[in-house]
Amino acid sequence: MEVQETQVQTDRVLTIPNILSMARLVGVPVFLWLILWPEFGGPESANYWALVVLALSGVSDYLDGKLARRWNQISRLGRVLDPAADRLYILSTLVGLTWRGILPLWLTAALLARELMLLIAVSVLARHRYGPPQVNFLGKAATFNLMYAFPLLLLSYGHHWFNTIAGIFGWAFAGWGTALYWWAGILYVVQVRRLIRADATVD
């Protein structure tokens, strides 16, 4: 279930890629607070600060993987932190945008159902003494699409011409991201099924 570039190369904790992933995790509650603040009487400028935090998380998401491979710093901790930060940003964005009525409930339900499916797959792997499935290219592509979609959808909240354009591109990214997200999830389930069958054959 792993490709060569995701093999563990170090057990160090304090590497630059891990620090970037930790910073992304710290940014999750900040982002959620900023995106919900206008709903409770806060200034509309909080939307733009939320966009800044989300943009920085996207940059750090790209950099931590790139630097880990380039500097041979792929670690066990990093392989847990990176997808955890991705999922927490997606979940916090879903909560914030759904609460504010920017995202429809059906889209939120579709993405949460995929997360539930993957959680069940991971629990099945754990019972067979396997770790969680590694992030593949398709999963990363899905995450990048969603990370583009969410700030654009937040930016679409308004009545100016650029809000309309942001909404068009935001929904395009959201559609592709949701489809890829489910495709990657189904591939994970197929991998889990193959592993379990292989174990049953050995036994």
Image: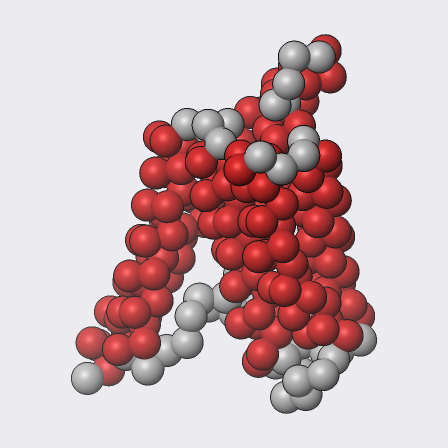
Look at the picture and state if 107 lies above or below 59.
above
Look at the picture and state if 42 lies above or below 161.
below
Classify residue 9 by image quadrant. bottom right
Is residue 70 among the parts visible in the rendering?
yes
Look at the picture and state if 140 lies above or below 76.
above
Is residue 150 among the parts visible in the rendering?
no
Q: Residue furthest front?
A: 41
Classify residue 68 by image quadrant. bottom right
Q: Residue at x 28, y 79 (%)?
A: 128
Judge from the rendering whether residue 32 lies leftward or rightward of residue 192; answer left or right: right
Q: Residue furthest bottom?
A: 11
How far from the left and from the top, in percent, is residue 101?
Answer: 46, 27
- Type of colouring: secondary structure
Q: Nearer the viewer, residue 97 or 177?
A: 97
Q: Residue at x 59, y 57 (%)?
A: 28
Judge from the rendering whether residue 199 lies leftward or rightward of residue 184; answer left or right: left
Look at the picture and state if 45 lies above or below 23.
above
How far from the left and from the top, in percent, is residue 176?
Answer: 53, 32
Judge from the rendering whether residue 133 lies leftward or rightward of residue 125; answer left or right: right
How far from the left and from the top, in percent, is residue 56?
Answer: 74, 51
Q: Nearer the viewer, residue 178 or 162?
A: 162
Q: Nearer the viewer, residue 77 or 180?
A: 77
In the picture, the quarter occupied by the C terminus is bottom left
Q: Residue at x 63, y 80 (%)?
A: 75
Q: Residue at x 65, y 70 (%)?
A: 22
Q: Nearer the viewer, residue 4 or 169?
A: 169
Query: How many marks overall?
Result: 0
